[in-house]
């Protein structure tokens, strides 16, 4: 697509673990559109992921940071603004993890220590990140901050477990911090509610394959891919969406407003 609509813009991209990661596609799209970026991921990603490979390919500095640690985020934001030579135009928060889901603990028996960690990594990290950006005055006026979320924040999807609560909190932080950031610094904050996508985090959810296929049939346009999510992120980082803030934006091929798909109705017809 590449129309250089991010020409001269600077940003931080969280969460590119491997080629399947949504953030991987976003990083590639931003650079193709003319942006300069810094990549970041959890220190453990150095062992289990390929973030370094992407950093080399895009010629982007890579600064590891655990999103649960204030000092890591402070170090990241200072390092990124130094490396990029000034304030930031955009930031993508593409981070999520649930220990209860990973350990396949039923929703009615959740472990609360694990839940603390889930909320800390997947939601509170968004507030923490914005607080660091705010305190360091690291965002340019009319800058754009985006986090990725899922429709389980609004409607129940039993296998998504406690990540539903994490996403509800994440979306609420976008609205609440978005107010302050808009009012005081003209910075916009939104969440993109993405279709099920075949990634490491996505396929950690129980029965993901069946669920992916269900959502695909239920969405008139089909599931939105990681690549199309990247295009949408680019539009939100661009100057074409300057007045959009505090929104949860569905990027799901129409899934969120579809009651029933005609293809699925066939299964319920009584042919007798
Ligand atoms: N895959 C889907 O179906 C789907 C759908 C809607 C929303 N999302 C959201 O998209 C975002 C990106 O997920 P993805 O699907 O690309 O999977 P992914 O596994 O590629 O990305 C998740 C990232 O979070 C990082 N992370 C985990 N703990 C961290 C920590 N403590 N500090 C810093 N980083 C940490 C991981 O290293 C990884 O890079 C997540 O917020 C996810 O919930 C995914």
Image (spheres, rainbow, N blue to C red):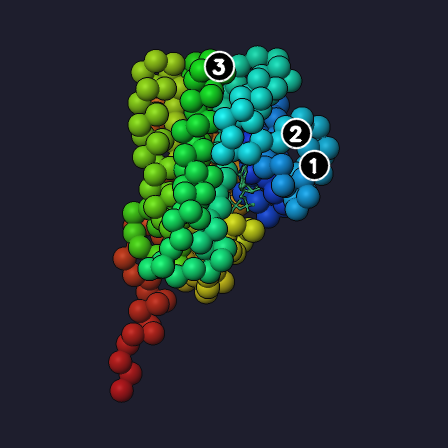
Whole-percent x and y of residue 83? 64, 18
| 188 shown above or below 49 | above
| 190 shown above or below 197 | above
> Which residue sits at x=53%, y=53%?
198
> Which residue sits at x=47%, y=39%?
121
Q: Secondary structure at mark 2?
A: loop
> Which residue sits at x=28%, y=76%?
269
Would residue 158 be found to the left or right of residue 68 on screen?
left
Which image quarter holds the N terminus? top right
* Residue 113 visible in the shown view: yes
For residue 62, which numbered disc appears in the image?
A: 2
Calculate the distance from the C-alpha at mark 1 to the C-alpha at mark 3: 27 Å
Would residue 14 be found to the left or right of residue 169 on screen?
right
Q: Secondary structure at mark 1?
A: helix
Q: Nearer the viewer, mark 1 or mark 3?
A: 3
Would residue 182 be found to the left or right of residue 210 on screen?
left
Labels 1 and 2 touching (C-beta < 8 A)? yes
Whole-percent x and y of residue 78? 57, 17
| 262 shown above or below 155 | below
Calculate the distance from the C-alpha at mark 2 to the C-alpha at mark 3: 20 Å
**Ligand 1 lies under 8 Å from the Cβ of mark 1:** no
* Residue 140 visible in the shown view: no
Q: Residues within 10 Å of mark 3 (few under 14, many from 20)?
A: some
For residue 52, which numbered disc appears in the image?
A: 1
Whole-percent x and y of residue 215? 41, 58
Which image quarter holds the C terminus? bottom left
For residue 136, which numbered disc appears in the image?
A: 3
Looking at marks 1 and 2 on the same chain, the residue that comes earlier in the sequence is marked by: 1
Looking at marks 2 and 3 on the same chain, the residue that comes earlier in the sequence is marked by: 2
């Amino acid at each position: 697509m590449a129309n250089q609509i991010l020409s001269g813009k600077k940003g931080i991209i969280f969460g590119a673990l491997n080629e399947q990661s949504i953030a991987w596609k976003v990083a590639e799209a931003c650079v193709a559109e003319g942006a300069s970026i810094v990549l970041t991921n959890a220190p453990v990603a150095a062992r289990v992921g390929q973030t370094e490979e992407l950093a080399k390919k895009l010629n982007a500095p890579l600064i590891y940071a655990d999103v649960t640690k204030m000092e890591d985020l402070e170090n990241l934001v200072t390092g990124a603004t130094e490396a990029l030579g000034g304030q930031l135009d955009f930031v993508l928060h593409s981070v999520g993890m649930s220990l209860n889901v990973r350990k396949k603990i039923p929703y009615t028996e959740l472990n609360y220590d694990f839940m603390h960690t889930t909320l800390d990594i997947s939601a509170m990290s968004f507030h923490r990140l914005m607080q660091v950006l705010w305190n360091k005055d690291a965002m340019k006026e009319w800058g754009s901050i985006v986090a990725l979320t899922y429709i389980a924040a609004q409607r129940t999807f039993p296998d998504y477990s406690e990540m539903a609560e994490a996403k509800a909190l994440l979306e609420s932080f976008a609205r609440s911090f978005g107010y302050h950031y808009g009012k005081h610094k003209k910075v916009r904050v939104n969440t993109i509610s993405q279709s099920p996508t075949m990634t490491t985090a996505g396929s950690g959810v129980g029965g993901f394959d069946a669920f992916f296929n269900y959502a695909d049939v239920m969405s008139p346009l089909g599931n939105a891919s990681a690549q199309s999510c990247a295009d949408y992120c680019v539009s939100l980082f661009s100057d074409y969406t300057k007045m959009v803030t505090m929104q949860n934006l569905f990027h799901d091929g129409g899934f969120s407003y579809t009651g029933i798909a005609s293809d699925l109705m066939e299964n319920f017809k009584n042919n007798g």
